[in-house]
């Protein structure tokens, strides 16, 4: 699944927030905290989700601007996942695309999981857009 949103802000400003592996909690409302051990390929982060879960991910590719990450263990409902956040300059603005591939855990309703994951993408990029465009 994928979601893209244009952001009316300088591409460098968008990349500095949305394209930073260690700043995920700074814009995503479903992430209460983010602890990363670096920002280079191989770095790991622990995300404390608003629902109390902690998930761990690893930076697997630097897209400059943007990155690719993958799960380091299962979550309550996903066996594994891999995501890609890309920031494409569009003149004085940016287009952010977030792609996510998920593998449900055994016994989890795959359709419900896909709907929840799509909502995660939309809510996260929507919040980043509002923040960067200073709409909130």
Image (spheres, rainbow, N blue to C red):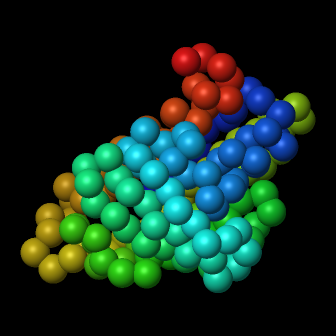
Depicted 50 relative to depicted 60: above or below: above
Question: Does residue 119 appear left or right of residue 133 in this picture?
Answer: left
Q: Quadrant of residue 85?
A: bottom right
Residue at 52% across, 33% down: 127
Q: Quadrant of residue 5?
A: top right
Q: Which residue is more in the foreground, 58 or 93? A: 58
Looking at the rendered structure, the number of numbered marks drawn on it comes to 0
Whether residue 59 is visible: no
Q: Residue furthest top?
A: 135
Q: Which residue is more in the foreground, 57 or 102? A: 57
Residue at 67% across, 71% down: 38
Q: Position of residue 118 (x, y in %)?
A: 38, 50
Depicted 52 relative to depicted 28: above or below: below
Question: Does residue 38 appear left or right of residue 116 in this picture?
Answer: right
Q: Position of residue 29 (x, y in %)?
A: 43, 39
Depicted 129 relative to depicted 16: above or below: above
Whether residue 17 is visible: yes
Q: Quadrant of residue 79?
A: bottom left
Residue at 49% across, 43% down: 28
Question: Does residue 56 appear left or right of residue 79 in this picture?
Answer: right
| Quadrant of the image containing the C terminus | top right
Q: Residue furthest right?
A: 91
| Quadrant of the image containing the N terminus | bottom left
Q: Position of residue 104 (x, y in %)?
A: 25, 73
Depicted 27 relative to depicted 62: above or below: above
Residue at 84% across, 43% down: 12
Q: Position of residue 17 (x, y in %)?
A: 69, 45
């Amino acid at each position: 699944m994928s979601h893209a949103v244009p952001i009316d802000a300088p591409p460098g400003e968008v990349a500095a927030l949305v394209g930073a592996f260690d700043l995920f909690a700074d814009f995503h409302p479903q992430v209460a905290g983010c602890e990363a051990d670096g920002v280079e390929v191989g770095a790991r982060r622990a995300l404390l989700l608003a629902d109390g879960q902690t998930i761990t991910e690893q930076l697997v590719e630097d897209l400059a601007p943007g990155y690719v990450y993958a799960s380091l263990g299962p979550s309550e409902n996903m066996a594994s996942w891999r995501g890609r956040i890309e920031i494409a300059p569009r003149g004085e603005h940016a287009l952010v695309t977030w792609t996510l591939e998920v593998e449900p855990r055994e016994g989890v309703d795959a359709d419900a999981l896909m709907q929840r994951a799509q909502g995660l993408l939309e809510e996260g990029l929507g919040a980043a857009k509002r923040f960067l465009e200073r709409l909130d």
